[in-house]
Amino acid sequence: MSSRTRVVTAQLTVLRAQHIEFVAQAHEPPARHEAGIQEQGLADEGEDAAQFAGVAGAIRGYPPPR
């Protein structure tokens, strides 16, 4: 194997390792972002519960008393 081939092979190995690390980081959500998603999810659940309670109350009150 020529020295040029060894150099190119080493460069490709380094690039491949960097690519693997980059892809792994891209698929790993940052902690702050993840916490924001969880907080939003809890807020959405609270809104859903409030809407359900409102709809349930409206259903119980229908038909209106005569």
Image (cartoon, rainbow, N blue to C red):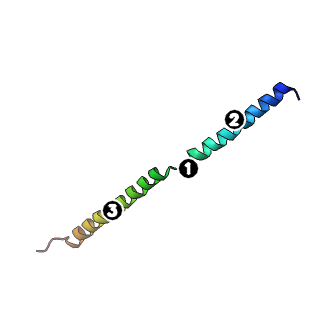
Given residues 11 and 66, the one toward you in this image is 11
Mark 2 = which residue?
15
> Quarter of the image holding residue 50?
bottom left
Q: Look at the image and tell me in which quarter the N terminus lies.
A: top right
- Say which element carries label 2: helix
Viewer-side label of 3, 1:
1
3D distance between C-alphas at marks 3 and 1: 29 Å
- The residue drawn where x is 18% and y is 71% is 63
Which one is earlier in the sequence, the residue at label 3 or at label 2? 2
- Say which element carries label 1: loop
Which amino acid type corresponds to the residue marked 1 in the rendered image? Glu
Given residues 11 and 58, the one toward you in this image is 11
- The residue drawn where x is 41% and y is 53% is 36
3D distance between C-alphas at marks 2 and 1: 20 Å
Viewer-side label of 3, 2:
2
Mark 1 = which residue?
28
Q: Crowding at label 2, few (<14), some or many (≥20) Cα neighbours within 10 Å? A: few
Q: Crowding at label 1, few (<14), some or many (≥20) Cα neighbours within 10 Å? A: few
Which amino acid type corresponds to the residue marked 3 in the rendered image? Asp
> Quarter of the image holding residue 15?
top right
Which amino acid type corresponds to the residue marked 2 in the rendered image? Leu
Confirm or deny contact between disc 3 and disc 1 (CB under 8 A).
no
Mark 3 = which residue?
48
| 66 shown above or below 47 | below
3D distance between C-alphas at marks 3 and 2: 48 Å
x and y, in percent, of residue 32 in the image:
45, 51
Which one is earlier in the sequence, the residue at label 2 or at label 1? 2
Q: Which mark is residue 4?
A: none
| 19 shown above or below 31 | above
- Looking at the image, residue 26 sits to the left or right of residue 7; the answer is left
> Quarter of the image holding residue 7?
top right
Which one is earlier in the sequence, the residue at label 3 or at label 1? 1
